[in-house]
Image (cartoon, rainbow, N blue to C red):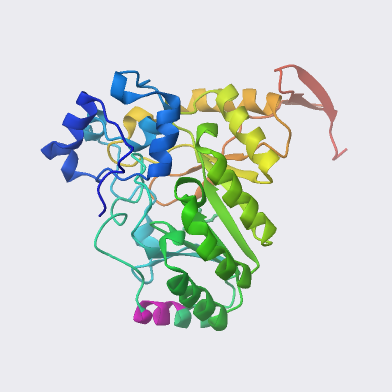
Amino acid sequence: MPGPPRNLHLTVDEAAFVSSQESATRLPMRLTSTVAQLMQAAGDASNGQVPHNDPLRLQFIPRAAELVVRPEERADPLGESEHSPYPRLVHRYPDRILILVTDKCAVHCRYCFRTRFTGTAAGVISDGEIDDICGYLRSHPEIREIILSGGDGLMLSPRELDAVLSRTRAALRCTFRIATRVPVVEPGLMDARIPCLARFRPLWIVLQVNHVNELGPAACEAIEALLSAGISVVSQTVLLRGVNDDAGVLAALFVRLVELGVKPYYLFQMDLAQGTSHFRVDLNRALGIVTELRGRVSGLAMPVFAVDIPGGHGKVRLEESALAERHDHGYLIRAADGSLHEYPRGDL
Ligand SMILES: *Cc1c(COP(=O)(O)O)cnc(C)c1O
């Protein structure tokens, strides 16, 4: 594991915790110089001007709060291990599978829900493991989509990426989806990978981005390069207390993504991962934020608000009921501003 980037300046308190025994037991600190640079842009730690609420510091610098593990939090909050026919394969929904192609990420998000795998010694998927998954694909022709995750799918070298994409495509022709933070946090890796990705269309990049501050000039160039290569890009965002739990902050992010040509796909209520309660937004408040957001941004900029039900019950969309009431003649629909409007019944 490489050391922290040279341009990262920690405060005395941050440095003390990062080097402490306790912090070493959990997910180690990991971030890139691109991220450190975006943090510097928000304040300069060397002269004590670090804004402690900086959305990037909150996401990537370990804090004592993450040592608090609440009883409802779980090591495998999505119950993925119960849907794993092979160790690196998660098959929860009939027509799509998820492959954990590497445990490596360019950055360690402090709210990671897959610490049972991320940053462990698992390494890159082996030839034998790809063989097993190809066999599984051949016996499950109902699968239409293959999601590469991990870890981060784009931490594979171009050669490793080519092996996974070409061999699984030969086994069963599917659409690929790659869940990644690399274009934003380590955009320098993209030039070498885009030609490979372009050979395996249809291929969708699902970019994790949580705050507009993450979209620096290099990230915007990497997104543009993906789109120019014919690769589709959507985004997913995790609702995080202190980082983006505000309709205005989310609106700025989603409007910017649409300007860049990226469709905001999911906004997630946080999973019950261990040591993440300081990031959790109360669900009722979250629904209020989402309702306010819907009143502010276009449909194109509006992601689906969803949660993975703890214990492996899958993803569900969460919406404050738009149908406020049902009466003899029809319905009352709630507009974004809270006002109620008639809509007639259709079954008379
Ligand atoms: C989220 C997820 C998917 C993809 O779900 P979509 O709703 O299609 O985005 C597929 N498999 C697993 C295991 C997942 O957690």
> Within the image, what quadrant is residue 263 found in?
top right
Q: Can residue 298 be seen here?
A: yes
Q: Which of 209 and 35 is in front in this view?
A: 35
Task: Give the residue at x 61% y 28%.
Answer: 252
Vertical placement of residue 78 versus 332, above or below: below
Q: Quadrant of the N terminus?
A: bottom left
Q: Can residue 234 be seen here?
A: no
Task: Give the residue at x 51% y 64%.
Answer: 192
- Relative placement, left or right, of 93 versus 56 is right
- Relative placement, left or right, of 42 versus 295 is left
Q: Which of 286 and 107 is in front in this view?
A: 107
Q: Position of residue 56 (x, y in %)?
A: 41, 33
Vertical placement of residue 270 versus 285, above or below: below
Q: Where is residue 10 in the image (x, y as percent from the top left)?
A: 27, 30
Instruction: Give the total of numbered labels.
Output: 0
Q: Where is residue 211 in the image (x, y as percent from the top left)?
A: 51, 33
Vertical placement of residue 177 versus 75, above or below: below
Q: Where is residue 51 in the image (x, y as percent from the top left)?
A: 38, 20
> Within the image, what quadrant is residue 146 found in?
bottom right
Q: Does the magenta stretch include residue 140?
A: no
Instruction: Specify the principal SS of the magenta part.
Output: helix
Q: Quadrant of the C terminus?
A: top right
Task: Give the residue at x 41% y 25%.
Answer: 54
Q: Is residue 128 magenta?
A: yes
User: Which stretch is magenta?
Assistant: 127-133
- Relative placement, left or right, of 236 versus 82 is right
> Within the image, what quadrant is residue 111 found in?
top left
Vertical placement of residue 245 versus 163, above or below: above
In this view, the residue farthest toward the left is: 21
Q: Nearer the viewer, residue 253 or 177?
A: 253
Task: Give the residue at x 53% y 38%.
Answer: 216
